[in-house]
Amino acid sequence: MKTGLLRAAAVAAALLTVAAAASAVELLNVSYDPTRELWRDINASFAAAYQKENGVAVVIKQSHGGSSSQARSVIDGLDADVVTLASYIDTDAIAQRGLITGDWVKRLPHNSLPYTSTIVFVVRKGNPKGIKDWPDLVKPGVEVITPNPKTSGNGYLSFFSAWGSVVLRGGSRAQATDYVTKLYRQVPVLDSGARGASTTFVQRGIGDVHLSWENEARLEVREAGGDLEVVYPPISIRAEPHVALVDASVDRKKTRAVAEAYLRYLYTDAAQEIIANHFYRPASEAVLARHAASFPALRLFAIQEIAASFPDAYKQFIAEGGVFDRIYKPR
Amino acid sequence: MAVRRRVLPGFSLSLGYTVFYLSVLVLLPIVACFSKAFSLSFEGFRAAVWTERTRAAYALTFGTSLVAAVVNVLLGLLIAWVLVRYRFPGRRLMDSLIDLPLALPTAVAGLVYASLYVKKGWLGRHLVPLGIQAAYSRLAIVLVLVFIGLPFVVRTVQPVLEDLDPEVEEAAASLGASRGQAFRRVILPPLYPALVTGFALAFARSLGEYGSVVFVSGNMPFKTEIAPVLIVARLEEYAYGEATAIAVVLLVISFAMLVLINLLERWTKGGEANA
């Protein structure tokens, strides 16, 4: 009797799953680590809106991880309909293999950037070392926490910011090299990723200042309950986490229309509000203005002001034989 | 040709499966690794695997693994001895604790070790004032590798020690051997092969360890940067060939060392048979 009931329930459940799978469109969004909560909220909002408008249910699956290892998974065959990675470098690597075609940056508004972000400082309560600007980081006795530029997006964006803070305020290349050399001598630990660096700074209490993604910094400070503060330097990099349709996948899975609607939805006021509430800087001027109190103005410089492009900056500064490699001398 | 009959049937079938699984699980990935690495030119390969930075990383990886394996041999022998020869409350619990490092995700081990030994950690707050930096240093790497490799020595030595009759020691004592002589001449020799095997396993395990080490080492170039970190760094550049080239170097050196250890093991067994 009991097993009969169970079996009936199991069959019913299986049928329901089949029915749901038949009518719902499934998308896979491959993203980077800190965006879990952001996409969970956007996905729920998009699914409801799309269902209402088109009567079609959409189920969006998420995959998170280090940005470049996510890109490598897509290159190696992970069936992503859309990629929302941390940096142009990673999306470009996928495009280089022909999985994303054409002039993909121009296919969506604002150069395919529904939001941008930057690198800011997190300091201990009361800012005991008086850290306000980039030159303060290399004062004697200041310990800086930032992840390894070779293995982390947060890591190389910190490097680019530091470099730009010198050359865009009249410094020479030699002065910038000198500055970053001093800066990385004050870094006691090169964590492999952004979350590791947060742990080192917050849980282990190491370091006086943490160079972090703006959105991560805000969460870190909110969770610390008054033990930490955010400091906005006067200048920092404009981080560009592009979004893109993976042409090869959407054509094979016949999901292009829904995937495109999904990416377009990111520019609606509803999605832009969610983006701002998660501390990413929204593309919409109107929404940004509404959240002006949350996003202090600072000079956000484009990568083109210090190099030809993100891949070029990576090659010059971070890749094997670049400036970063020359900071460390064998002992 | 006469085929000798075996007691159990199915030799060809089981050998077939063995060869098949070994090929798919072990050989194929290694071949893929080598073919990727050799897609580089000779100069490219050399440039990827032989720089001051990579040499420092190999030295660190092999050095810390070696030290950790030696520590594990001494510590493992002691623990195995205590577990086999003495009966005390909590012995079974202690025995099951030994396998814990195998089950625990190594990243967790790394994170826990780091939080214990940093300046504000439970142990670090006493050690750091004494000048002992056991987090974000080479010592940290050795500590965590000792943790990871511990079960291998204990578990290889334990069964041999269990088979060793305590009466043999008593006989040695009654024949006038001192405690030290009894240990060196009577107890240790039959343990050599097991100790060498345990050493080899712990050493090999340490060479490939990544998860725990990245969290405790600090990853400072030339100081605490292990070779696997360099592999990850090259992958970030989408330089697959260069990344696998470093992996191939690690593989070849590890393989050579394991062959050497195997020879040593056979030699110690031979010594035992002759005695």
Image (spheres, helix red, strand yellow):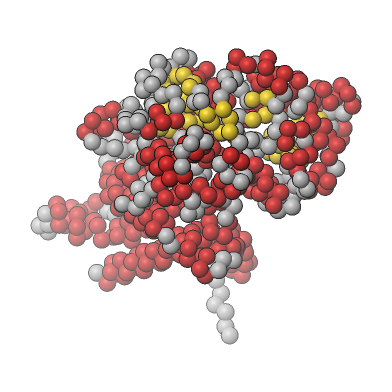
Which quadrant would residue A273 be assigned to in this image?
top right
Query: Residue A11 in the image: x percent, y percent?
Result: 82, 32
Q: Considering depth in this image, is A269 or A284 the residue closer to the camera?
A: A284
Which quadrant would residue B193 be assigned to in this image?
bottom left
Give the quadrant of the C terminus of chain B.
bottom left
Query: Residue A326 in the image: x percent, y percent?
Result: 42, 50
Q: Which residue is rendered at x = 52% and y = 70% of the image?
A: B42
| Left or right placement of residue B15 versus residue A196 in this view | right
Is residue B182 shown to the viewer in this render?
Answer: yes
Q: Does residue A110 sit above or below A318 in this rendering? A: above
Query: Residue B238 in the image: x percent, y percent?
Result: 59, 52
Residue lying furthest bottom in this view?
B1
Q: Considering depth in this image, is A67 or A131 the residue closer to the camera?
A: A131
| Left or right placement of residue B233 versus residue A25 in this view | left
Give the quadrant of the N terminus of chain B.
bottom right
| Left or right placement of residue A237 versus residue A94 in this view | left
Q: Does residue A229 sit above or below A176 in this rendering? A: above
Q: Considering depth in this image, is A38 or B69 the residue closer to the camera?
A: A38
| Left or right placement of residue B167 versus residue A85 in this view | left
Residue lying furthest front in this view?
A170
Q: Which residue is rendered at x = 34% and y = 28% of the image?
A: B121
Q: How many marks?
A: 0
Q: Does residue B97 sit above or below A99 in this rendering? A: above
